[in-house]
Image: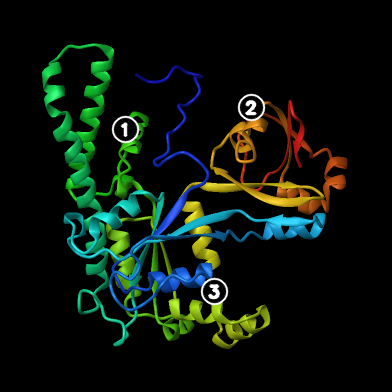
Amino acid sequence: MAPKKGAPAEEKVQLGRPGNNLKIGVVGLPNVGKSTFFNAITNSAVAAENYPFCTIDPEESRVAVPDERLDWLNEKVKPAGKTPAFLTVIDIAGLVKGAAEGAGLGNAFLSHISAVDGIFHMIRAFTDPDVVHVEGEMDPARDLEIIHNELRLKDVAMLNKYIDLNQRVIDRMGGGGSVEDKKKKDEFAIVVRVRDWVAKGNDVRKGEWSNKDIEVINSQSLLTAKPVTYLVNVSEKDYARKKNKYLLLIKKWIDENNPGDKLIPFSGVFESNLAALPDAAQRKAYTEEMKVESAFPKIITTGYDSLNLMHFFTAGEKEVRAWTCRKGAKMNEAARSIHNDIADSLIQVDVMKFDELKAAGGEAELKAAGRLLTRSKDAIIEDGDIVYFRSGLGRAKK
């Protein structure tokens, strides 16, 4: 039945678990450069030896999300401290063909993927005789198929397990039953429909689902429901010359199988060499010599965005800070990123739009122009808003 004229549109439920502290996992075959990437992006010391299962336990690190707006606010306000938004990155050991049936250490690694909210799918597009390819010959399209098939097979297995456990109960209910029985039958029917979709070779995230469907899907923690960003690891030489013989093949596969997904080329060797340099001057000289910049800022912001995250700012004498929230969050939901008490007692919010603040030159000039906005706690917060939460606790955060 169509909604009544003038009725507010139903708020779309998002795939994935709710919350702001979301994680993205680095996934791929063994020896594609995942740990080299992780070492460089986090400056940590995960083992990166050349054998398939050197990373058994997932390694976790937080990386700063670059944002020039935060840098501008910091220069303008000159606070005692500056805190960026963060993206949590998990290094997950390599999957192999047959992982869904337990090959390699498949079941353990697939459970690690289940625990993250998004995927950096890394594809090898470099040749190196010293780094063996687990499948022998180089074939990026085959490698992409292997990972996607393993994730889909695991989803089908998890959904079949749910169906097997509940089939008899649903059959006994027949055509009647209580409201609770109808709810269980509806949920069962959705699971069967999702299983059939995935069994046909589709990812859950590419389906058209109602809010009711998505609520059931989210309860299942399915691997193919997670957003994917493709990272193509090329040689340092190819990265510097911006050419690689496998890139068009990989892009063609993505366009045919998962249109709209982002592809970012990078070089693990280049990023590793860059991260190893001791100071900013030497890193600048290296990028000028190679005539390329690090791909990490783009990778981090793309991964952050793929999780449907954004950030707003607070700015005061003590600190300028970026706070993470989900896109489409209301003011009171965003305030919860800072403290539950602020959210629970929120009255209204003073808001400055970043572009207007920058154009005005400062807060005093913006106020003089009448552009300091007041919003209710149910208003939607927008990316880049600089906010002052007014709550029952006083002027809660500046």
Which amino acid is tagged 1? Val
Which amino acid is tagged 2? Asp
Residue 154 position, x and y percent, is: 22, 50
Name above or below for residue 286 compared with residue 51: below
Q: Residue at x 88, y 41 (%)?
A: 368
Q: Earlier in the sequence, mark 2 or mark 1?
A: 1
Q: Which residue is mark 3?
A: 294
Q: Which residue is mark 2?
A: 344
Which amino acid is tagged 3? Ser
C-alpha distance separating marks 2 and 1: 28 Å
Name above or below for residue 36 compared with residue 152: below
Look at the image and tell me in which quarter the N terminus lies: top left
Side (left or right) of 286 relative to 306: right
Quadrant of residue 156 within the rendered picture: top left
Q: Which residue is mark 1?
A: 216
C-alpha distance separating marks 3 and 2: 42 Å
Q: Is residue 292 visible?
A: no
Dot 2 falls on a residue whose secondary structure is helix
